[in-house]
Image (cartoon, rainbow, N blue to C red):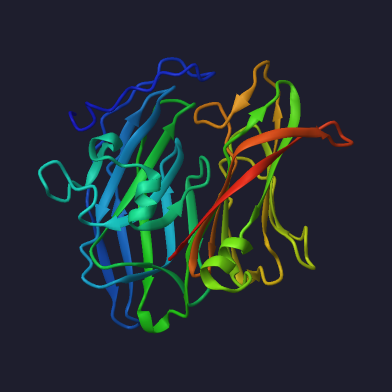
């Protein structure tokens, strides 16, 4: 019961939540199951369930699982299952020397993120992005096309940043992860993440609104690789909350400017990820445009945040040799469309690193 004693209890004016309490969590172990016939392998990990009372919101909490793999792993699929109230979780892989326990051991289980200096940017920089859960989805599979995989180096630790939000009756809930790996001889494509976000969300009260940001990815691509965009998209996962009417990803530039890569108006609770086989090609384009649409019935403005606020994010896996990010930290209104939707345009900042 002391595991998370130092984690702050989150208390926000998050309608319709009252006081938000943080229960103690404990994690249990996992295993790898070899399949000698194909040399493929399935890795399974279950975190012990915990009690979440009505109105519970858990943030600033991490979970970890050390694989003790002596060789690199090529992950072609990730499956997630939970027992409910898991609002969102982001999972990363890092060297096992990172985020060790207080006694210098693996320290696997559940722990306050701040206790070990965890943050998502640091985790992505130390290793990489493994999986992200759709909002409130109870089961989800991230599966890539045959021969495509994420490479995990030898001796890695899986670390998740979790967000539990229980608006229903009291529940006992836990989460389980399954990784499917390929032998290196079957891998044809190494995947890398691309992320886009609109951080400058500012939804006006009692109005429909839309926020868009167009990111030029060709400029850093030419600077670092000396060639135009030539990668393909293998998987897309959007992220938004209850006020969203949908999310769209489009090509920017070239003969197919404006072509829709991905679009959804699905409600939260549904698995929103989509795989592409064959991959969606960006050849001829100069970048991507992200648009999120909302309907805010409240009397107050809504911004980018957790709880009853909103988000606008998309995670993409590509065969690019670069890890790419684009985000809008500033934006401005640009008028209304013919249907009276308040339109906003963000300024895109881009970061590109060699994978």
Determine the residue positioned at 49% across, 58% down: 141
* Residue 30 placement (x, y as % from top left): 25, 56
Which of the 4 image quadrants contains residue 24? Answer: top left
Which of the 4 image quadrants contains residue 339? Answer: top right
- 103 relative to 218 in the view: left or right: left
Residue toward you, 120 or 32: 120
The relative height of residue 349 versus residue 303 in the rendered view (above or below) is below
The relative height of residue 269 versus residue 273 in the rendered view (above or below) is above
Q: Quadrant of the C terminus?
A: bottom left
Residue toward you, 57 or 252: 252
Q: Quadrant of the N terminus?
A: top left
* Residue 86 placement (x, y as % from top left): 44, 38
* Residue 111 placement (x, y as % from top left): 25, 38
- 348 relative to 325 in the view: left or right: right
Determine the residue positioned at 52% across, 46% down: 134
* Residue 149 placement (x, y as % from top left): 44, 70
Determine the residue positioned at 51% across, 76% down: 146
The relative height of residue 132 versus residue 179 in the rendered view (above or below) is above
Is any atom of residue 196 visible in this view? Answer: no
- 347 relative to 12 in the view: left or right: right
């Amino acid at each position: 019961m002391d595991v998370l004693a130092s984690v702050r209890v989150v208390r926000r004016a998050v309608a319709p939540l009252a006081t938000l309490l943080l229960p103690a969590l404990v994690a249990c172990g996992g295993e790898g199951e070899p399949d000698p016939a194909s040399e493929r392998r399935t890795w399974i990990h279950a975190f012990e369930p915990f009690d979440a009372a009505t109105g519970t919101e858990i943030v600033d909490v991490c979970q970890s699982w050390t694989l003790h793999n002596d060789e690199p792993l090529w992950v072609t699929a990730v499956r997630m299952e939970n027992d409910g109230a898991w609002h969102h979780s982001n999972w990363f892989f890092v060297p096992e020397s990172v985020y060790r326990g207080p006694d210098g051991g693996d320290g696997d289980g559940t722990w306050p993120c701040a206790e070990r200096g965890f943050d998502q940017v640091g985790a992505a920089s130390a290793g990489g992005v493994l999986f992200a859960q759709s909002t409130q989805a109870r089961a989800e599979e991230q599966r890539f096309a045959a021969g495509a995989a994420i490479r995990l180096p030898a001796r890695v630790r899986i670390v998740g940043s979790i967000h539990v939000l229980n608006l229903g009756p009291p529940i006992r809930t836990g989460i389980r992860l399954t990784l499917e790996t390929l032998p290196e001889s079957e891998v044809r494509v190494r995947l890398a993440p691309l992320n886009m976000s609109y951080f400058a969300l500012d939804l006006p009260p009692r109005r429909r609104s839309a926020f868009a940001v167009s990111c030029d990815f060709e400029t850093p691509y030419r600077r670092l690789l000396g060639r135009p965009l030539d990668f393909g998209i293998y998987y897309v996962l959007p992220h938004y909350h209850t006020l969203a009417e949908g999310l769209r990803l489009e090509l920017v530039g070239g003969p197919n400017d404006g072509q829709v890569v991905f679009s959804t108006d699905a409600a939260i609770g549904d698995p929103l990820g989509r795989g592409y086989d064959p991959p969606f090609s960006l050849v001829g384009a100069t970048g991507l445009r992200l648009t999120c649409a909302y309907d805010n019935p409240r009397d107050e403005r809504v911004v980018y945040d957790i709880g009853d606020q909103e988000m606008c994010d998309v995670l993409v896996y590509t065969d690019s040799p670069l890890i790419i990010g684009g985000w809008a930290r500033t934006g401005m209104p640009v008028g209304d469309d013919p249907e009276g939707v308040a339109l906003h345009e963000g300024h895109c900042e881009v970061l590109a690193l060699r994978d």
